[in-house]
Image: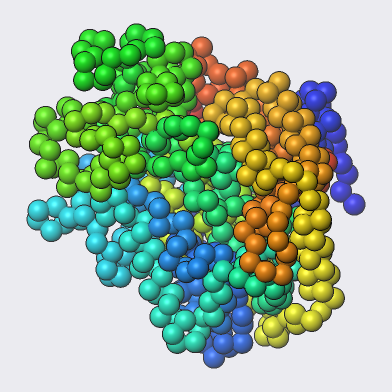
Amino acid sequence: MNSLLSITLTEMNTASFSIDANYHLDAKVPPGPLEQKWQHFKSNSRLVSPANRKKYHIIVVGTGLAGASAAASLAEQGYNVSTFCFQDSPRRAHSVAAQGGVNAMKNYQNDGDSVFRMFYDTLKGGDFRAREANVYRLAECSAHLIDQAVAQGVPFAREYSGYLANRSFGGVQVSRTFYARGQTGQQLLLGAYQAMMRQVGLGKIKSYSRHEMLDLVVEDGMAKGIIARNLDTGELGRYAAHAVVLATGGFGKIYYLSTLAMGCNGTAIWRAHKRGALTACPSWTQIHPTCLPQSGSHQSKLTLMSESLRNDGRIWVPKRKNESRAPIDIPEEERDYYLERRYPAFGNLAPRDISSRAAKERIDAGYGVGKMKNAVYLDFKDAIHAQGKETIRKKYGNLFDMYHKITAVDAYQSPMLISPAAHFSMGGLWVDYELGTNIPGLFAIGEANFSDHGANRLGANSLLQACVDGYYILPYTLPHYLAALSGEPVPSSRSEAFGIAEHEVNNSLQQLLTIQGTRTVDDFHRELGKILYDKCGLIRSENGLKEAIKEIDELMGEFYQNLKIPGRHDEMNDELEKAGRVADYLEIGKEMCIDALSRNESCGAHFREEHQTPEGEALRNDKEFQYTSCWKYDKQKPMLVKEPLQFEVVTPTERNYK
């Protein structure tokens, strides 16, 4: 039996969690030089013959870019696949909202890009808190994606000569981002969706829309299927398979006000966590610097403006506090282009975590602009003067149109107002090099896992990871797992494990309905979001995190005593759906705070006030915290398991974008 060791960091930490020092995590990284590891795996992986593939059944939960590409690829190989999404169509997955582009190492600009440079940019951007092997594979596979997407008909922007166009994103000094105006996610998703629906038409994929996964079924230590609820009828269903793939995205909506769609949630990965799957670094949540600011308490959603706008837009605030003049009336000498001032080598394309904190610092210091003084300016005056309005319109026209539709402000004439907002989850389920969790048969891909970004994601790497996981990695690693099953039949959904799981889901739904208090689900969600944004958001501190844990515990108690849900469980019930998700958010939020409290350093998006350089930058502690924080579920006192990070090719250094 593994021994449990107490934490000696602080008295508070000891009360929050314990450490299992003897639990060994096998990341399954192949041997050999870094640039040969992926080829080594592919060359030595087990295979399933074409004649036997039809005997295997795979469940894919989530039909965004990661899920749709994985389902299409596996079905094309000959496996039987079932897909599940809570939207009314797979086309409505949140990948559709990604705007600015997708990274790939093609070096079309001949500006010095390479696989190694892309690998290093990504590793450095994540503050050296990711596995070298995973990050290198992401860069290595990136070039293939562009060729495939073009073949699928994705209308990437092109130069006059016909070559594909590129632009830059934050944290890099080359142009490697391919884009389809401000609709890159939508266009890539349409390509994956069409590939998936072709397999639906051929009978190789069975698609379940308006179904939400509410539990993972584990039998004999292996994933055997899921329990899902039909959101139109309320009926619970049992679905068995040889393997389950979670491609359900991130949980940034936990902050209530975020850039994510209203339905985005963390329920699938959290229910898997409660069945034994480890989470990894759940507190590493990215706050995006280029979002429309909150305009009042009525809002439940914020709108993202693509980071690509920072290629030509200049970010500034007035040098005078509480400025009341219109931006056009503020002369150049009275403007503070603070990113260009603080980070001259990267300027307005500094990484997202750094740019967001810099904006918050200016806003908190009294230099914010807009009605609520909670924004900064993103100004295109100089770009329009140098390039012409029509050139800017060709690059960003739909984004300018969207801004005008929401704000009634013409960004060609006046600067945009932008502000930091919760966006992307770098944390998620722990996975090994093969994208498998610690539960055999359970895989996690895309934003549902933690694997490729470290403590901060570089812009335009999200679409890349989702596509690479689904198109190029899982179609090798999942058959490698299936081949070891030696032709076992599809598990029975009538087993005791399925019965117990369905019973527990039904009981939890009934429990929520019988509370009959006075507060709405949204009321609880809004309060949780404020706690997390204030105390586990852009900036964290030991005292703030201790307060947040206490407040979340109190809110959780209030939730189960005073929640009000109308209707029944055996019918369409949007409030019941939301209640289940917020119940999970309360537990996720507590684990996020405990994870942040356990890491006495600053790294990437995790910025602890107590750990910063004299210049106010993140101060890592590689001696004590060069590991991935993995967590075993316990509602009161989760258990920390460490996966050490070993750097064989690069040497972690202090991030410097100056």
Identify the residue at horizontal 57%, vertical 87% (top origin): 54
Asked whether, in this view, residue 211 is left or right of residue 497, the answer is left
Asked whether, in this view, residue 338 is left or right of residue 266, the answer is left
Of 495 and 276, nearer the camera is: 495
Tell me: residue 469, above or below residue 624: below
- Is residue 103 visible from the viewing direction of this image? no
Identify the residue at horizontal 10%, vertical 36% (top origin): 388
Residue 532 rendering spot, x and y as whole percentages: 63, 33
Identify the residue at horizontal 79%, vertical 34% (top origin): 554
Of 324 and 332, nearer the camera is: 324
Of 374 and 588, nearer the camera is: 374
The quarter of the image holding the C terminus is top left
Asked whether, in this view, residue 546 is left or right of residue 97, the answer is right
Residue 385 rendering spot, x and y as whole percentages: 11, 29
Tell me: residue 566, above or below residue 68: above
The answer to which quarter of the image holds residue 256 is top right
Residue 392 rendering spot, x and y as whole percentages: 17, 40
Identify the residue at horizontal 67%, vertical 69% (top origin): 571
Residue 551 rendering spot, x and y as whole percentages: 74, 31
- Is residue 550 visible from the viewing direction of this image? yes
Of 188 and 74, nearer the camera is: 188
Visual colour scheme: rainbow
Tell me: residue 347, above or below residue 476: above
Q: Residue furthest bottom?
A: 51
For the image, the number of numbered tags is 0
